[in-house]
Image (cartoon, rainbow, N blue to C red):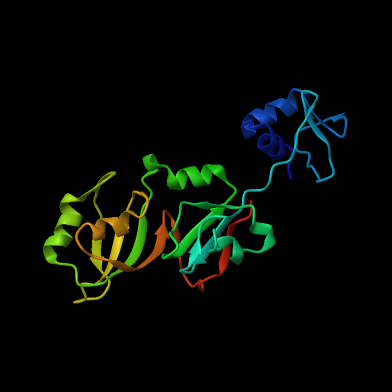
Amino acid sequence: MRLNKFVAQASGLSRRAADAAIHEGRVAVNGETATLGLTVTEHGTVTLDSKPLTAVPEPITIMLHKPVGYVCSRNGQGSKTVYDLLPAEYQQLKPVGRLDKDSSGLLLLTNDGDLAYELTHPSKQKTKVYEVELDKPLAPLHRQMISDFGIQLDDGPSKLQLERLEEGNDTKWQVTMSEGRNRQIRRTFAALGYTVTKLHRTHLGVYRLVSLAPGSIRVMTTT
């Protein structure tokens, strides 16, 4: 790894500030004052202002096609968890948002806190898309209420964008939203007397679930 990148990641400095620290002679590698352009191996010792710097893990993000029946936590309390599906090298990653046990689809896991914040913080308004199946056809009035006015829930109004998945079939809908409140889609339909029998996430921000079998993963980033 290039020295300036290592110093930036380990110290919290910007890349430019790391370059400045190296230029000013504040950085040493294996006891020798460092110069710009050096690379660092895993066995090298790096100090900044005589204080040792510890390497931080490379950012990794994976996409998991979460099957129904798995919870998004380490302690399943008797249930299977998404960590049962992950190889050992990805066990330290954390879910970006949640899918409940009865839901399936796109789940990201990462050790990149900036990415997790960007995708989940309400101020970022990231689009999420789901395929939803109901226990009975959605009445036109109820569709209008959900799409145009929103449904009042205990934690505030819920407004969803709805599109039919199949022409003439009013039980299967594509739901688009930018919020992420707990079980929001299920609670919205339940407030009008419907039960969601299938909930499958296909998109989260720029990420899209394509050609990935249930229970399988895809590495999205390694640097």
Q: Position of residue 42 (x, y in %)?
A: 81, 46
Q: How many numbered discs sit on the rendered protein?
A: 0
Q: Residue at x 38, y 42 (%)?
A: 122
Q: Residue at x 74, y 22 (%)?
A: 24
- Above or below, 25 against 120 in this view is above
- Residue 84 visible in image: yes
Examine the image and state in which quarter residue 54 appears. top right
In front: 51, or 190? 190
| Residue at far front of view | 78
- Residue 161 visible in image: no
- Above or below, 31 against 119 in this view is above
Q: Residue at x 36, y 45 (%)?
A: 125
Q: Position of residue 170 (x, y in %)?
A: 20, 72
- Above or below, 1 against 206 in this view is above
In front: 40, or 137? 137
> In the shown orientation, is residue 170 left or right of residue 7?
left
> In the shown orientation, is residue 61 left or right of residue 136?
right
Instruction: Pick the quarter of the image with the N terminus.
Output: top right
Q: Residue at x 43, y 55 (%)?
A: 206
> In the shown orientation, is residue 60 left or right of residue 195?
right
In front: 191, or 206? 191
| Residue at far left of view | 141
Q: Position of residue 21 (x, y in %)?
A: 71, 26
Q: Position of residue 118 (x, y in %)?
A: 46, 44
